[in-house]
Amino acid sequence: MQSIYVTGASGMIGSEIAADLVHRDPTFNTTAVSRRPCPTLGADHPAHKQVHTVFDGSWLAPQDTDATILHCAGLANPRVSFSNFAVLAHEHILPHVEMLEALLARGWRGRLVFFSSGGTVYGNALELPIREDHPKAPISMYGLHKLILEHAFAQLAEDRGFELVILRVSNPYGSMVSKPNQGVIPILIKALLRDEEFQIIGDGHAERDYIEISDLIAAVRNVIAFETREPVEIFNIGSGERTSLQDLIATLRKLTGHDLKTVHSPSKVDVQSNVLDCSRAKNALGWTAKTSLEQGLGKLLERMDVHYHQG
């Protein structure tokens, strides 16, 4: 039985992946690892291992030296700011490297799947859609920290002999697990359902790539089964659809029949437009996103509408 560990299992991506693997696939021995409870598995679930820190690697069982580790732990908000780079490096780069070094010291030589950010590592696109070989020039601390971790993990994979798969994920949505002010789509829907004012940062015309959570989970399943050809494999994971904030608002208006109160404010640090070319994932993994934006928003709107009326 293949052992799979999901770090960051209290966050949106990690918790959704962990629940899918635990509930839908008994052929995997899945362990969800996080400092806080995993919201999709519930309290005291035997598949969840709550730890003081994920970064010491002590959660890895001695026999699981060939385990697949889905590394979702880390910063969740791309708009997070830091006073200086030293703080970012000390708090959000070094711990990840130390975790990997600890795992290697315990004899692990399996597969690491690192969830990077297709929305921030490339910076302002020279051409759309963006391929994996596009120049990387992040304009935010969040994108910089993801890119540095990509390089650090890749160097260790080459030197120490484990498999690394980097997933540059676009903007996932569709989960009920989210922190306050995390993700524009749930914030938009909450404002709509509560008849509250929504703040548009910038002019609302910059295009983004949004991927429904079930499509992301399907990609992860294909990555688990994928036979790597190189020590380091990199894939864009997104819908490939161009969607502006104005498009999101128009689609929600169409689905609900309700208008949305909006106010505008300037954007300080944000990429202009970002849409991913996912043809490499299609060719190598046999995966493509199947959920249209209207379908995905409809599913999430229904779930959130029920949630808030019951709450």
Image (tube, rainbow, N blue to C red):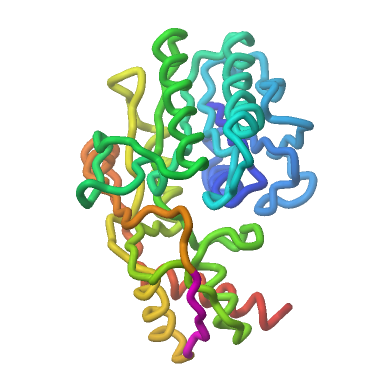
Q: Position of residue 129 (x, y in %)?
A: 23, 51
User: Magenta includes 260?
Assistant: yes
Q: Is residue 296 above or below residue 80?
A: below
x and y percentages locating residue 8 in the rendered image? 63, 40
Tell whether 202 sits left or right of 234: right
x then y, percent, for residue 117:
43, 43
Look at the image and tell me whether residue 30 can be seen.
Answer: no
Quadrant where the C terminus sits is: bottom right
Which residue is at the front of the view, 250 or 31? 250
Task: Tell me what residue is drawn at x 55 percent, y 82 percent.
Answer: 192
Which residue is located at x 76 percent, y 32 percent? 51
- Residue nearest the viewer, comparing 60 with 252: 252
Quadrant location of residue 131? top left
Magenta-tinted stretch: 259-265
Identify whether 255 is placed above or below 125: below
Question: Who is closer to the viewer here, 254 or 250?
Answer: 250
Total numbered circles: 0
Image point (49%, 67%), residue name: 185
Q: Is residue 15 magenta?
A: no
Quadrant in the picture for residue 134: top left
Q: Main secondary structure of the magenta part?
A: strand
> In the picture provided, is 172 more to the left or to the right than 44?
left
* Residue 188, position as x, y percentages in the image: 52, 73
Question: Looking at the image, is 13 positioned above or below residue 248?
Answer: above
Relative depth, front residue between 56 and 9: 56
The answer to whether one can see residue 258 in this image is yes
Left or right of 7: which side holds 280?
Answer: left
- Give the residue displayed 60% in from the left and 63% down from the top: 176
